[in-house]
Image (tube, rainbow, N blue to C red):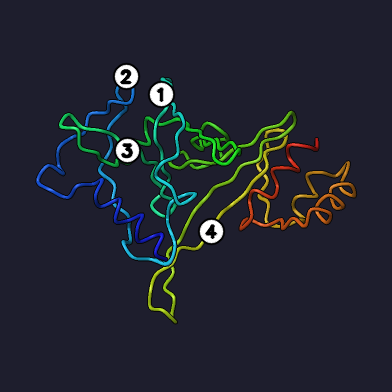
Amino acid sequence: MKLYKRIFIAILIILGFSNNLIAQPIPKQSSKNLINGKIWTPSLMNSENSQLFLNSLGLKGQLKMQSIIHQNVILGYDLEQDEILTTIETRNNTKRIIALNKSELEEFKFKKAGQDFHFKRGDLIHENLDKDTYYQVTTNNSLVYVIHRKMIKILRQKTSKYSFKSDNTIYIIQNGLLHQIRNRKDLLKIYTKNSSEIKKFIQRNKLKIKPKYPMNIIPIVSNYDS
């Protein structure tokens, strides 16, 4: 818990609560300015865990806005408020965390601990996905694996403090059709040709196939054709 307190103390320092807070920040990260969004604040300043994806505001990656690619952008993803964040410098060399404008942001990606993370706006993936949020995508020759990551606030009765709980939804797109995956049975319906082999793979690697553990499906999608 001390880790999260340190994170949010750092956030307060970066935000720099002062009379200058309402100033519109001007990014210095690219020769072409990012579309400025609102200044971000966490929904809770004292919780048992973090609403941030990978508990980080320092994910170095790239994003695409209005068909323009911005490299070496420092990113964060607030999964509870569904906001994509970046830390920028203003003209007076102070830092601000802003939530990027979703109407302009098409996709973003970064790498963490050797793992690639690629997120795209829903309407750019499938017509039945939400155009106002972002989904992690993994693609192979025959299908697309889609993760919608979300955190919800819950109140812990024992501690009287809030915590964040994952509330993910996962899908596989096959032949243009969107299939929601809730468990191993749903997954094996996609892989009818080699279901027995995949069952063995799941058992051998002790994979839990459920939305709470969305990364467990990636090795299956990456190694097997449907």
Between the residue at mark 2 and the residue at mark 3, the CA separation in whole angstroms equals 16 Å
Return the disc, 2 or 3, that comes first in the chain's sequence: 2
* Circles 2 and 1: CB atoms closer than 8 Å: yes
Assess disc 4: are there few (<14), some (14-19) or many (≥20) residues with their C-alpha within 10 Å of its C-alpha.
some
| Type of the residue with mark 3 | Thr
* Circles 4 and 1: CB atoms closer than 8 Å: no
| Type of the residue with mark 4 | Asp
Q: Which residue is mark 3?
A: 87
Q: Is disc 1 placed on a helix, strand or loop?
A: strand
Q: Is disc 4 placed on a helix, strand or loop?
A: loop
Assess disc 2: are there few (<14), some (14-19) or many (≥20) residues with their C-alpha within 10 Å of its C-alpha.
few
Return the disc, 4 or 1, that comes first in the chain's sequence: 1
Q: Please, which residue is most extreme toward the left here?
A: 19
Q: Which mark is residue 70?
A: 1
Q: Which residue is mark 2?
A: 32
Q: Quadrant of residue 6?
A: bottom left
50 sits to left or right of 34: right
Q: Which residue is mark 4?
A: 167
Q: Is disc 3 placed on a helix, strand or loop?
A: strand
In the image, residue 220 lies at what x, y percent?
76, 43
